[in-house]
Image (spheres, grey):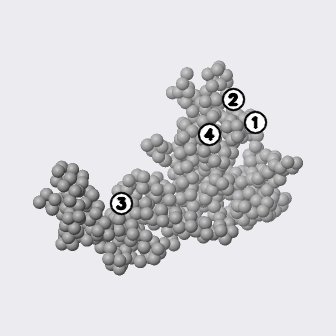
Amino acid sequence: MEYEAVIGLETHVQLKTKSKMWCGCANSYGSDPNTNVCPVCLGMPGVLPVANDEALKLTVLTGYLLNCEIPGRAKFDRKNYFYPDVPKNYQITQYDQPSTKNGYVEFEFEGRLQRVRITRAHLEEDVSKNSHFDRHSGVDCNRAGVPLLEIVSEPDITSPDMAYAYLNALKDILTYGGVSDCDMEKGMVRCDVNVSVRPKGTTALGAKIEIKNMNTFSGARKALEYEIPRQIDVLNKGGKLFQTTMRWDDLSGMTEEMRSKEDAHDYRYFPDPDLMPFEPTEAWLLDVQKRVVELPLARKQRFIEQYQLPAGDAEVFKNDVALGNYFEPIAKLSKNPKGVANWVINNLRAKLTEAHEKAVAEQSAMGMDPEDMTLPSVDDLKFSPDALAELVDLVDSGKISSKIAQEVFAEMFETGATPGSIVEKKGLSQVSDTGALEKFCDEVIAANPKIVEDYRGGKVAAINSLKGQVMKLSKGKANPGLVGEILEKKLKA
Ligand code: ADP
Ligand code: MG
Ligand code: ZN
């Protein structure tokens, strides 16, 4: 029998707030263990949580970015469980009245638009981090109480690659919106992968296997690539699948069982008596709406349409937001936005990478931490953005050749001088004066009787060698189109 995979993801994302969800402790990564803690996030008796308004705003902002409904009332519940990572013995979350629900994410996948529905994106708090050593374990509560968004997808995903594309799309959207830095290395995005299989063409859902706490997207994809054939194999051998919670072991490349799945009633959810339900006012919502940004896919599509960019260029600007932001105002100034994109992507980006590497090398030689380095970006360029539009225009109007333009660009990058002034100062203007060009051509023809003979004898390509010599003679400044015409005329005479 043929089977198909059914996948739904629960993605946890740390929100980009200065302080934690219920107290004033810093929400920061890399501090010494248990230094960002207080009686509230340590779960001491007698303290009261106060909701972080910015976290509530980022949650609702995410709702807008994910095309969700924002209910008029949300509430906080206690999810009760006993484990050393949760000092209070419960985690505050949103159970039956989440801040956002019923949305979708749209992204490009295998050459078409794919939509995955979002069940809900709700706010909860992160828990502590356990570390296991040889003879003891440690609990670091710095992360306890950090605001966390849980984004639950409908089981609309049908392959490991689609899951991977969905996660990346989600990450792009949240980064664009300023909701989270989504730094995987700092554990800011983690996901639980739910997967079942069913006979192709049927609609009933099979028993769900949940693989907990994947902290890389490629790991999630690998786990699915392993788990789907495993489930199909069990069924093909006449076996039965049961709802199970599993763990992915990256070393063995296999899933292993953690526990049979717990149910909601195991957690004894109840409304947190210390927290009022959240009922946003119109003004508050309006404030959040002002922060809605253009989504990555929309930006890519708009760049293609508005500036006639090739999809590849638009994709570069989608992925490199700063570069795209730099490009757009110049594109608006220029008659040739596509030409500007070409310069920004092929020349400017290369120069920036070079400068970047140089700065890293210099600063690490000084013993500086990568976190503290100051690195060049488009904001530090010496030339003004309209200089780039001017440069493209100089090439398009035939004033300089594209080869000379490279030289001008290098100089602009170093000194910040305008392209016009560089061309003038260095006498780089393209020679389109036919008198001067004729003289160059005559000289080259006289010096190369053999090649001229070849050409006249029918080896048409021989003209290229002559053309090359004229260009050289003119130090690259001759207008190549004109040179071709003049040479041809003279040789045929
Ligand atoms: P639970 O209550 O066990 O957490 P949910 O119904 O909330 O389960 O679903 C959790 C995630 O699992 C969601 O992303 C959902 O799309 C996905 N999911 C639910 N049932 C299945 C299934 N049979 N196969 C694959 N994914 C599923
Ligand atoms: Mg769930
Ligand atoms: Zn605290």
Q: State which quarter of the image contains the C terminus.
A: bottom left
Amino acid type, callout 4: Lys
- Mark 1 vs ligand 1: CB below 8 Å: no
Amino acid on which disc 3 is placed:
Lys
Residue 195, x across and y down, in percent:
62, 36
* Lower sequence index among marks 2 and 1: 2
Judging by the rendered image, the residue that carries numbered circle 3 is 338
Viewer can see residue 290? no
Pointer 2 or 4: first along the chain: 4
Name the amino acid, label 1: Arg
Determine whether label 2 and label 4 are within 8 Å by CB.
no
Residue at the disc numbered 4:
222
User: What residue sits 73% from the left and 34% below the top?
Assistant: 257
Identity of the residue drawn at 79% across and 46% down: 81
- Upstream in the sequence, badge 3 or badge 2? 2
Q: Residues within 10 Å of mark 1 (few under 14, many from 20)?
A: few
Classify 10 Å Cα crowding around label 2: few (below 14), some (14-19), many (20 and above): few
Residue 242 marker? 2
Give the label on residue 259, or none: 1
In 3D space, how far apart are the residues under numbered discs 1 and 3 (Cα atoms)? 56 Å
Label 2, secondary structure: give it.
loop
> Residue 51: x and y, percent?
69, 61
Work out how far the residue at label 1 is from the one at label 4, CA to CA, in angstroms: 21 Å
Res 448 visible: yes
